[in-house]
Amino acid sequence: MDETLQREDMKQKELKIGDLTLKRPIFQGGMGVGVSLGGLAGAVAAAGGAGAISAAQIGFREPDFDTRTLEANLRAMDKELNKARRIAKGGVVGFNIMVAMQHYADYVRQAVKGGADFIVSGAGLPVDLPGYAAGSDVKLAPIVSTEKSAAVILKYWAKKWNRVPDFLVIEGPKAGGHLGFTGEQLSFFDAVTYREEVKRIIAKVQEYEEKFSGKIPVVLGGGISSREKADEAFALGVDAIQVASRFVTTEECDADERYKQAYIKARKEDVMLVKSPVGMPGRAIRNSLAERVMGGEKFPPKRCRGCIKGCKPAEIPYCITEALIQAVKGDAENGLLFCGADAWKAERMETVQEVIDDLV
């Protein structure tokens, strides 16, 4: 088939997930703190994709965030979902909720109560997500990075909850933010070896499709920054792509303009791996904070807002909440600028519609 016709055909491809329909097979990846809120998620949904609001410390602009963090976050979840709905023109909007967050169950229940279309959940395996969302029709999706993690979550949900995910998200080693890989795995996986891993994950999903007699759409994210990369992803047999970094440099993104400009100014060598207090490696843009952290400096938290399970404020190199909030508010040198491997390729500001049209 002529390449132009192939691309036009892909633009018409809808993705059905139960009673949800995506006019374009693209999910916007969740970006916290505050990078993907109602503005970006709503715009992606209006353009035919699926918009994901990041629940991570979402209430950072609420007046009582420092003193009543949980309440502020739950309140902000409703505000941002309602904002996204107003923008989305009936499109698909949901939440990205990290398993590693304190009060994880409360955030899931708030998303369900608010009427989110879906919940995507990673930074740990969401083994109990179906229980927290029981009785609702919210679509549930775990994030996995390896065949092993996919096998574990599929087996657990089948055995404990007698169900499978409504869809499954694979985040590869080129993704941004916290990565579901050890440093050793990041060294091992390249484009070729990870393609084989994706095929193994898809094969594992197909086992459970047969057991439960239903389709489990697979979404692939991580380093998908161009039509060529998107086409390669679809050629592996996935049903949709997940894209995050390309949406940062859009007019609709919720981050401060200086955050967006940091992406545009970044060079390839500025994208680096950093240590995160969460205990996972992360990918970010090189700046003063990143270099000082990697150099061994420590920045004691000004106050603990109880964001991550198991965090010991006296022992961590820096506070992930403080670093991410500083970044999204525009402090491009002293904040943590999470990004994907191809973030440096951004050259200009775009609209959400332009990004989606370029990719799918």
Image (cartoon, helix red, strand yellow):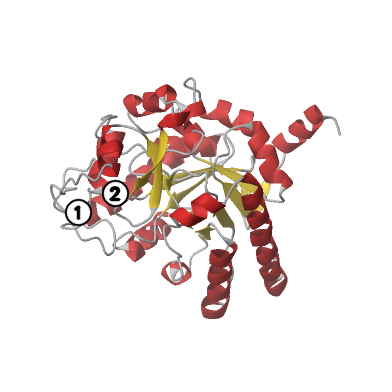
Can residue 117 be seen in the rendering of this structure?
no
Task: Name the quadrant of the N terminus.
Answer: top right
Label 2 sits on what residue type? Gln
Label 1 sits on what residue type? Arg
In the picture, measured across the screen, residue 10 lies left or right of residue 115, that is right
Can residue 276 be seen in the rendering of this structure?
yes
- Cα separation between marks 2 and 1: 9 Å
Residue at the limit of the structure toward the right, as seen here: 1
Disc 1: CA contacts within 10 A as few (<14), some (14-19) or many (>=20)? some
| Location of residue 356 by image quarter | top right
The residue wearing badge 1 is 305
The residue wearing badge 2 is 57
Q: Toward the viewer: 135 or 343?
A: 343
**Mark 2 falls on what kind of element?**
loop
Q: Please tell me whether residue 347 is drawn above or below residue 341 in the rendered image.
A: above
In the picture, measured across the screen, residue 185 lies left or right of residue 65, that is right
The total number of labels drawn is 2
Q: Toward the viewer: 210 or 230?
A: 230
Numbered tag placed on residue 29 in the rendering: none
Verify CB contact (< 8 Å) between mark 2 and mark 1. Answer: yes
Task: Name the quadrant of the C terminus.
Answer: top right
- Residue 289 in percent (x, y) is at 26, 37
- Residue 261 in percent (x, y) is at 38, 23
**Mark 1 falls on what kind of element?**
loop
Q: Please tell me whether residue 36 is drawn above or below residue 332 in the rendered image.
A: below
